[in-house]
Image (spheres, helix red, strand yellow):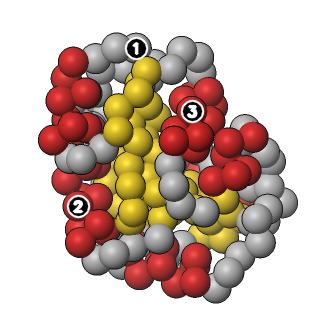
Amino acid sequence: MISVIIPALGDEPALIETLAILVEGVAEGVLRDCVVVSAKPSELLERYADAAGCVFRVETGPREALIRKGASLVRSEWSLVITPGLVPSGEWLNALADWVSDRPGIDEGAFIPFFAKRGLWAMLGAWAMNVRTRVTGRVDILQGLVASTSVLRDGLVPRTAMTQLDARMVDRRVGVTA
C-alpha cells in the first residue's frame, strides 16, 4: 500500500479535486493513508482534509520541508507526493500498484507525467517537462512523485533514474495554465 503526501503552500480550494480522486485509491486498496501539510494555518484546508479522512498538519518552510513533515507522519513504505489541485488520470492506480509490486530499490523513484489540456505551447511545455524528469531525475511540482517514504523523510535527493508511470497528471486548479 502507498501513502499520500499533499504539500500545500497556500489556501488552495482545489485540494478538494485531489482528495476526491484519491477516494478511489483507498477503495481499491492501493492507497493507505493521506497527510495534508500546509505552509500556513488554513481552516478551509483543515476542513477538506478532515472530511476526506486525512491528517492535517502545519509546517513552516519550503515545499521540501512540507514533504519531509508529511513523510514523518505516514505509515507506508512508499509515498505519492501530489500538489493540491492536480489529479491523476488514466490507469494511475494500476500503474502505482504495479510499480510498487515490482519491488523497486529504495533509491528508485517514479513519476506521473503532467498533461496539458490546452494549447500547443502548453502541450510542448508539458512534453519538455516530462522529458527533463526522465533525463535529470528531478520531478516538477506538476508531476506526481512516487518515492520511498524513508528517502522523503531525509529530504528529496536527486535521482539518476526515474520511471515514468503509464498515467497522467491533469491540472484542475482554476485559472492556471501550464
Name the residue that disc number 3 marks. 69
* Relative vertical location of residue 43 with respect to residue 32 in this rendering, above or below: above
- The quarter of the displayed image where residue 56 is located: top left
* Camera-side mark, 3 or 2: 3
Name the residue that disc number 2 marks. 23
Front residue of this view, candidates 5 and 140: 5
- Mark 3: secondary structure: helix
The picture places residue 103, in percent across and down from the top left corner, at 68, 81
The picture places residue 154, in percent across and down from the top left corner, at 75, 40
* Camera-side mark, 1 or 3: 3
- Give the quadrant of the C terminus: top left
**Between disc 2 and disc 1, whose residue precedes?**
2
Residue 16 seen anywhere in this rendered image of the structure: yes
> Label 3 amino acid?
Lys
**Between disc 1 and disc 3, whose residue precedes?**
1
* Relative vertical location of residue 24 with respect to residue 81 in this rendering, above or below: below
Q: Is residue 175 left or right of residue 144?
A: left
> Label 1 amino acid?
Lys
Name the residue that disc number 1 marks. 40
Q: CA distance from mark 1 to mark 3?
A: 13 Å
* Relative vertical location of residue 21 with respect to residue 14 in this rendering, above or below: below
> Label 2 amino acid?
Val
- The quarter of the displayed image where residue 172 is located: top left
Residue occupying the point 68% across, 42% down: 153
- Mark 2: secondary structure: helix
Q: CA distance from mark 3 to mark 2?
A: 22 Å
Residue occupying the point 41% across, 27% down: 57
Q: Is residue 59 left or right of residue 155?
A: left
Near mark 3 (Cα within 10 A), the count class, few <14, some 14-19 or many ≥20, is many
Say whether marks 3 and 2 touch (CB < 8 Å).
no
User: How many labels, in total?
Assistant: 3
